[in-house]
Image: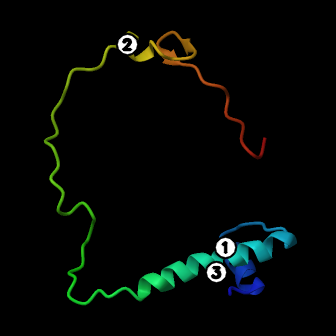
C-alpha cells in the first residue's frame, strides 16, 4: 500500500492540497491504480510487435470538404439562443 508520506510527496509535486483526512483515502485509491499497472506488467508480450499508435492499422476515410450545415436547422433544437449562437448558463469556477 502507498504510504501517507508518498501520497503527500506526490500531492506536493502535483500541487494538490489535500486535507489530512483525505490522505488515507487517496493512498488506498492510488494503491489500487498502481496494482492495476502491476497487473498489466505481468501480461505476456513476447512475440508481440510494438505499436506506435493504436490507429496505425486503421483505414481512415478521405478528408473531403462538404457544404456547411444550415444554421437555422442546427439551432432549431437549441434550448436558448441569442441571434445565431447557442446561449448557455454561465460556468462558475471553483475559485469564484
The quadrant in which residue 42 appears is bottom left
Circle 2 sits on which residue?
73
Please provide percent x and percent y for residue 85: 49, 17
Q: Earlier in the sequence, mark 3 or mark 2?
A: 3
Q: Is residue 2 left or right of residue 55?
A: right
Mark seen at residue 92? none
Rendered residue at 68%/87% (across/down) = 1
Using a 10 Å C-alpha cutoff, classify the residue at mark 1 as few (fewer than 14 neighbours), some (14 to 19) or many (20 or more). Answer: some
Circle 1 sits on which residue?
29
Q: Is residue 73 left or right of residue 52?
A: right
Rendered residue at 70%/85% (across/down) = 6
Please provide percent x and percent y for residue 31: 64, 80
Which color scheme did the rendering employ for the protein?
Answer: rainbow
Q: Is residue 68 left or right of residue 21?
A: left
Rendered residue at 86%/71% (across/down) = 21
Q: Secondary structure at mark 1?
A: helix
- Tell whether label 3 touches label 1 (CB within 8 Å): yes
Kindly report which numbered mark, 3 or 2, lies closer to the viewer in this rendering.
3
- Front in this rendered view, residue 65 or 29: 29
Q: Secondary structure at mark 2?
A: helix
- Front in this rendered view, residue 48 or 80: 48
Using a 10 Å C-alpha cutoff, classify the residue at mark 2 as few (fewer than 14 neighbours), some (14 to 19) or many (20 or more). Answer: few
- Tell whether label 1 touches label 2 (CB within 8 Å): no
- Front in this rendered view, residue 96 or 33: 33
Residue 46, relative to residue 74: is it above or below? below
Rendered residue at 72%/72% (across/down) = 26
Residue 65, relative to residue 16: is it above or below? above
Circle 3 sits on which residue?
31
Cα–Cα span, label 3 and label 2: 50 Å
Residue 63, relative to residue 17: is it above or below? above
Please provide percent x and percent y for residue 25: 76, 72
Amino acid at each position: 500500500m502507498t504510504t501517507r508520506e508518498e501520497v503527500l510527496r506526490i500531492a506536493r509535486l502535483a500541487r494538490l492540497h489535500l486535507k489530512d483526512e483525505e490522505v488515507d483515502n487517496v493512498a488506498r485509491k492510488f494503491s489500487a491504480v498502481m496494482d492495476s499497472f502491476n497487473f498489466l506488467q505481468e501480461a505476456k508480450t513476447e512475440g508481440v510487435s510494438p505499436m506506435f499508435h493504436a490507429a496505425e492499422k486503421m483505414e481512415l476515410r478521405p478528408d473531403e470538404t462538404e457544404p456547411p450545415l444550415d444554421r437555422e436547422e442546427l439551432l432549431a433544437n437549441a434550448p436558448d439562443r441569442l441571434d445565431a449562437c447557442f446561449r448557455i448558463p454561465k460556468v462558475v469556477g471553483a475559485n469564484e
